[in-house]
Amino acid sequence: MIDYKGLVQDDRIHASLYTDPRVFDDEMEHVFHRGWVFVGHASEIPRPGDYVTRTLGTEPAIMVRAGDGTISVLVNRCRHRGTMVCPADRGHVRTLTCPYHGWTYDLRGELLGVPYPGGYASLDKSANGLPRAPRVSEYRGFVFASLAAEGVSLAEHLGPATRLIDRSCDLSPEGQIELTAGWVRHRCAANWKMLPENDSDGYHLGFVHMALFRTIRSQYQRVVGDERSIKAVVRDWGRGHIEIDWSPGYEGLFEWLGSASGAAVERFVAAIERRDGPEVARRRFREGPAHALIFPNLFLGETNIAIVQPVSVEECVHWHTPMFWKGVPEWNGRLLRMAEAGMGPASFLMPDDLIVASRNQQGLHARTSPWLYLGRGLNRETVDADGRIVSHVTDETTNRGFFHHLRAVMSEV
Amino acid sequence: MSTSDADHRAVADFVYREARLADEARYAEWLALWTDDGVYWVPAATDPGADPERHLSHIYDNRARIETRVKLLQTGIRHSQEPASLMRRLISNIEIEAAGDGDLIAGSNFILAELAVQARRELHWWAGRVTHRLRRVDGQLRMSRKTVVLVNAAEPLPNLAFLI
């Protein structure tokens, strides 16, 4: 048994958390199997029979919509010989049929039949369905699953952090986002925890991304200036959910888009004003969508949605797709181009993040001085009226929030 | 419209030169190969129905963004290409056809060996088919469109921050 209270202390963490395969195995069990993980969005499988394949930690899974509209998350492993029933990334099927010996399951994973059943004295179909996540729950189309039959509810897990999801979805005049552009997956030669940490790190921008700031104007440039002039903040929402909020630094509307004007903006503003009134609409367009990590693997990356997929202790994959706002499809082209600029292997930001992450991973194998001090900002963070810890955007409040929740989850028996 | 032997030679020379400039990180010279309306597309799918207006791509740069991509590499602090990957690509299976407007369309296959020297110094192999659309501007061939369909376009990819 690894002592996680020893490895994750209040202001420092031990490097073996990133390099020890036993820690990775414990994380798969405690974080990705027992806990709630993001699987996909309901808009990816609009019709009965639509499915996508994902992983729950390293467990191959199928997210599929049944004839009654309900969504199941099934383990992608035939009960007979363990074959992956759905080898493709996505598809549309009437039944789930194993390609090896033709065992056939319905869209909820129940075994319908096996070829040549005379070879079995008795076969209890009800006990031989595809293994399924016993708990699947949605919030505004975001589908989460847990492989544990019991535990905290999704509502308890998300807690007040649903407001972060709301902030992104409420920019749609219909209150719904759609993930229909397809995913790009980016391989990273580093431990999976580097991705949520880096995605919510406001300290690195002026260094890792200085090349971009020297090349074009960017809304992130405001965090490169004088420490005292920066207004953006980080927040720890509890239960590992962590946020960068750039909006205290935004003065005008749409600064989070770089800028925007013209007829498409006027229609967009008018649609939200009709629903929410001018004051709330103005706030929404000033603040923009959330920049936050929903523990452990969903990153609300402003106009992108991203997934963190652990592969091994030394490797992970960052998925991303642009978030389309239902009701204003004229924005989709711009959102696609923003997604390509920001995330993915050929983008202007993420390749630099991931090369630094892989250098971190190499450096962390050094055995001398294995502790990482994570105390930045302890001298100035505060607790707001909603109980969230808030600090300067460059502070490690987010790393602490992530690791302290990880410690709690990993210490559960 | 038919193509001449001279067209074939000129296209092959262009495609080889473009590859060499990319391999050798000669960014300004590579940028000069583009027309003012250039479009650089690396789809994230091998499906010929991939549509950059509806589907996410790895790269879908208009001319302004091609310039941003090059300027970023020229800063010397683009960490994912600092130092630049060591690369050589082999090009083969060149086929050309004439478009109605006088442009030439060139298809070619490539294999690229990339030593990603920035962190783990791994050798990455890339392969795919490239389509160049070429136009004569002041007597010189220039590319107005370059599309690169990687064989693994839809798979998880490592950094692709160099000029593919």
Image (cartoon, rainbow, N blue to C red):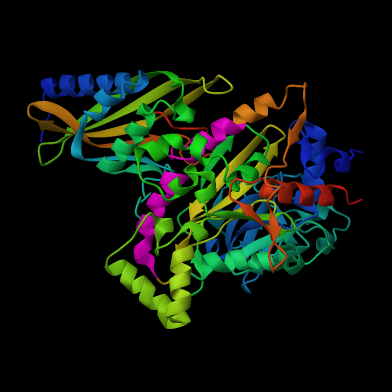
Q: Can you see residue A318?
A: yes
Q: Quadrant of the N terminus of chain A?
A: top right
Q: Can you see residue A325?
A: no
Please name the residue shown 89% across and 38% down the image: A2
Please name the residue shown 64% across and 46% down the image: A395
Q: Please give the count of numbered marks on the rendered protein.
A: 0
Location of residue B72 with respect to A165 vertically, above or below: above
Q: Quadrant of residue A159?
A: bottom right
Please name the residue shown 60% across and 42% down the image: A198
Q: Residue furthest left?
A: B138
Read off the magenta span.
A328-357
Residue A370 in percent (x, y) is at: 77, 28
* Front residue of A222 and A288: A222
Residue A265 in percent (x, y) is at: 33, 67
* Magenta segment includes B71: no
Q: Quadrant of residue A346?
A: top left
* Front residue of A178 and A158: A158
Q: In this image, A35 relative to A398: left or right?
A: right
Please name the residue shown 83% across and 62% down the image: A149
Q: In this image, B134 relative to A85: left or right?
A: left
Residue A356 in percent (x, y) is at: 57, 31
Residue B57 in percent (x, y) is at: 41, 45
Location of residue A287 with respect to A117 vertically, above or below: below
Magenta stretch, main secondary structure class: helix
* Magenta segment includes A348: yes
Q: Quadrant of residue B133?
A: top left
Q: Residue furthest front?
A: A228
Q: In this image, B151 relative to B36: left or right?
A: right
